[in-house]
Image (tube, coloured by chain):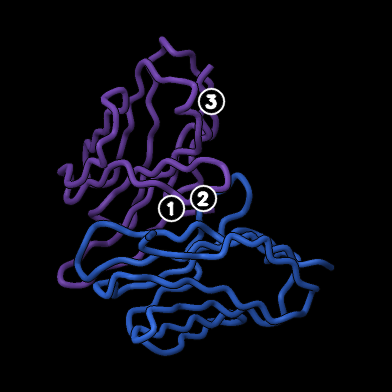
Chain colours: A blue, B purple
Amino acid sequence: QKEVEQDPGPLSVPEGAIVSLNCTYSNSAFQYFMWYRQYSRKGPELLMYTYSSGNKEDGRFTAQVDKSSKYISLFIRDSQPSDSATYLCAMSPYNFNKFYFGSGTKLNVKP
Amino acid sequence: DTEVTQTPKHLVMGMTNKKSLKCEQHMGHRAMYWYKQKAKKPPELMFVYSYEKLSINESVPSRFSPECPNSSLLNLHLHALQPEDSALYLCASAHKTRPDNSPLHFGNGTRLTVT
């Protein structure tokens, strides 16, 4: 079993839709949770970074962490064609060098 | 543009060549990383430097040789590579201040093709 599971998609939605991206994990030692957006032929760009359970909002993006269920989500409101990219979740234990990535979900927002 | 700069952006090399990838950051981060990413796959950790010392080597073949000359620079020396080593090589950095952790900040990578 992988430490981080993420549905690879592709996920196709119309412009303006609310998008929900999810990851599950098995290691209860994970304390830090990140979401990255990666456009084709570019490096991953940090979107959201959370430590505790609960919600964190930044503009159109909301990150949600449920440590009891070992489940994290990224919500994108009013999705735009420019949001079309691959979204990677990542997580790490407390005070540790290694980061564990999901396989990435490819999102396509249609105009 | 990212705050982690990688050069070159593209590199084509033969199996007998020696080349180097370079990475630079000026965010004061003290942890630096090399990742390898194949198409449609997540980044795969290769090496971690913490305070300029190699702290993690993920059993990477010796034809890849990392170097961290100072806290801002990270190199990856390449020698006698194989075609299957063709990939996007990503550099990343993190603040790494105890006891807190911090997220990775990636560069845009070097797209390497081995012929």
Q: Is residue B113 left or right of residue A90?
A: right
Side (left or right) of B51 relative to A72: left
Q: Are marks 3 and 1 on the same chain?
A: yes
- Amino acid marked by disc 3: Thr
The numbered mark, 3 or 1, whose residue comes first in the sequence reads: 1
Does mark 1 fall on the same chain as mark 2?
A: no
- Report the front residue among B74 and A55: A55
Image marks 2 and 1: residues in contact by CB distance under 8 Å? yes
For the point 38% across and 70% down, the residue is A25
Q: Is residue B36 left or right of residue B29?
A: right
Percent x, y for residue A88?
50, 62
Instruction: Tell me the kind of residue under disc 2.
Output: Gly
Q: How many marks?
A: 3
Of helix, strand and loop, which one carries label 3? strand
Report how far apart the C-alphas of labels 3 and 2 lie in the structure: 17 Å
Query: Could you say whether the residue bearing mark 2 is in a helix, strand or loop?
Result: loop
Disc 1 crowd rating (10 Å Cα; few below 14, some 14-19, many 20+) is many
Vertical placement of A73 versus B59: above or below? Answer: below
Residue that carries the numbered disc 1 in the rendered image: B106
Q: What residue is shown with label 2?
A: A43
Residue A36 drawn at (x, y percent)? 50, 63
Give the foreground label among 3 and 1.
Answer: 3
Residue under pointer 3: B113
Please state which of the two labelled residues, at mark 3 or mark 2, is closer to the viewer.
Answer: 3
User: Residue B100: x, y in percent?
Assistant: 21, 72
Farthest front residue in view? A1
